[in-house]
Amino acid sequence: MKTDARSVVTQLLPHRTPIRHTADAFAPANIALCKYWGKRNEALKLPLTGSLSISLGDLGTRMRIQLAEKDHLIINDEEQSTESKAFWRLFDFFNLFREPDTFFKVESINTIPMSAGLASSASAFACAVNGLNDLYGWGLGNRERSILSRLGSGSASRSICDGFVEWNCGTREDGMDSYAAPLPVVWPEFRIGILTLSSDKKAVGSSEGMQRTVETSTLYKSWPTQVKKDLPMIRQAIEDHDFTTLGTRAEQNALSMHATMISAWPPILYWQPESIETLKQVHVLRKDGVEVFATMDAGPNVKLLFLDQDTGDIRNVFPELQLVEPFATVTD
Amino acid sequence: MKTDARSVVTQLLPHRTPIRHTADAFAPANIALCKYWGKRNEALKLPLTGSLSISLGDLGTRMRIQLAEKDHLIINDEEQSTESKAFWRLFDFFNLFREPDTFFKVESINTIPMSAGLASSASAFACAVNGLNDLYGWGLGNRERSILSRLGSGSASRSICDGFVEWNCGTREDGMDSYAAPLPVVWPEFRIGILTLSSDKKAVGSSEGMQRTVETSTLYKSWPTQVKKDLPMIRQAIEDHDFTTLGTRAEQNALSMHATMISAWPPILYWQPESIETLKQVHVLRKDGVEVFATMDAGPNVKLLFLDQDTGDIRNVFPELQLVEPFATVTD
């Protein structure tokens, strides 16, 4: 018999009785350096490969969850309709955890611009789990919170920790070994630059794009081999503070993920003309000796990876850059 | 012992004594519907997979070869310097065929705009072989001329015939089974539309791009599987006049080839912003019910595949389209 999401939750939760009326929570957004692209189990959002990300410090989702008479969702001060996708996706997720007579008022604030095309679902679902953990007093650790967040959105499994985070693929059918854990590395000079090139709604959602790629791209068959090469090299480069290797692997990994989409049918072209232009600018900068690398997710925007020392040179070319210091709040 | 190009030529030529002073020749350019991307032997330009193309009718290279006191090359009425790449590439090729005391004056005219980014080397080398065949009176057939043209430029092996042409990969080390032959199909309604988006010089030559892809792209490992799927389907679709299958396979094949380049390191981005814009316009047209498909070679330009009946709709979106009727000169 196949495991479903509800039975995973039942295994992990000590009880379903709230211990307080209100909980405040936060979870960071994250950007994958070695991408998650392709599921082996749709219902449990189990990945086909491992992945590795960097959390974005205090950029992410803040959420207040309160017991209420009926379900409400307010995102960035805007009440969401009960028919909206955001509404049913969140409360369907909550149904896994609560008794049928429990309702919530959820106020959610994204501290990262929605338009930046950064996976807000990752920080939102991780934040929801953090909030429920507090409201119910479950006392769950990273492992359990990562597994539960994954049931809402795959990449949310990585948004439960700060800094560099690795999501272990796992092999179990119930996914109990598929969760994320932080790498014990602090790299204060590490910088991320976000370039918002387009805030158009995506033509193809990332979950649909992922599935179409797995089903129709012949080149995707080599994607697990790509990850098998990149993931250990990126992990080692982080431990060694070897930025060149990290950047090289991260950029090739991201472009290879997009290559699998481009080779799908119908082709998935998240790239906009501006994406190409930006990638070419990054390559020119690199030729000029500035160590900057690009990464992209299921959308047209480009994120830059670099070290603090090159911030000035990079800002000269990209004045609109939104700078992220992932370790700014860490006192080490 | 490895076979070299000179020994292949020696096997095929009956003699090296010109029988006339002047020869006039022509060879068409060609566009691959299933791409040639990757060599198994650099010196003999033996491919890793088969490929299939359509020749462009009277668009290609016209050449007059004359015996002379020293080597001259004139392309489109412009004398080429003895240091130019075009000069040494052509006369190095001629060295395979001639005695050391033989020199040529070569006047070459491209009947297809150079700026269109269509592989002029394919028609040029095939045309050179046709010209030599006449000048020396060798009486070589398609097979021999295809093998000899390949030694100049891989895709030239397909430019020796009109219409649809398949280049058999072959397995022999000396490449004697790696040559192109026409498919006996006439499809008068078949159209090609050339869009010249950029005439910038390529940053990476196609031969270098091919080699870099084979050496550094993990996704390239699945490229032969892609060809194994596409090539027989495209061949069958041509026989059946099944345009939907032909277009679908040709577009996915071309985008997959570009995907292998995008996943190489350093990434090979032949695409310009305009390439993306054009691909998206093609996809919108298709959503609107117009059967048009895109193909691209080692450059930023997009070529459209469609049937005569849709020419009007396609011209409305792409007024700058250069229309090619590959079977216009065929009387069937």
Image (cartoon, coloured by chain):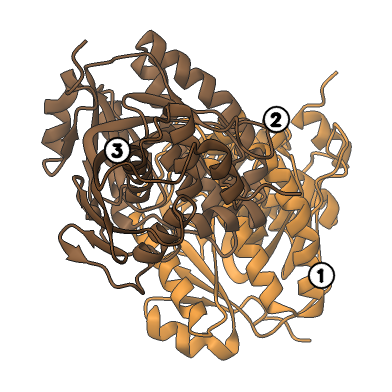
Chain colours: A brown, B orange
x, y percent for residue B282 = 47, 72
Q: Residue at left 56%, top 31%?
A: A227
Regarding mark 1 in the picture, which secondary structure is present there? helix
A146 sits left or right of A171 in the view: left
Q: Residue at left 39%, top 78%?
A: B318
- Are the residues flagged by discs 3 and 2 in contact, CB closer than 8 Å? no
Tell me which amino acid carries mark 3: Ala
Residue A47 versus residue A249 in the image, above or below: below
Tell me which amino acid carries mark 1: Gln
x, y percent for residue B231 = 76, 58
The front one of A217 and B44 is A217
Q: Which mark is residue B215?
A: none
Query: From the viewer's perspective, is the residue at label 3 or at label 1 nearer?
Result: 3
A297 sits left or right of A210 in the view: left
Q: Which mark is residue B236?
A: 1
Write down the residue under mark 2: B43
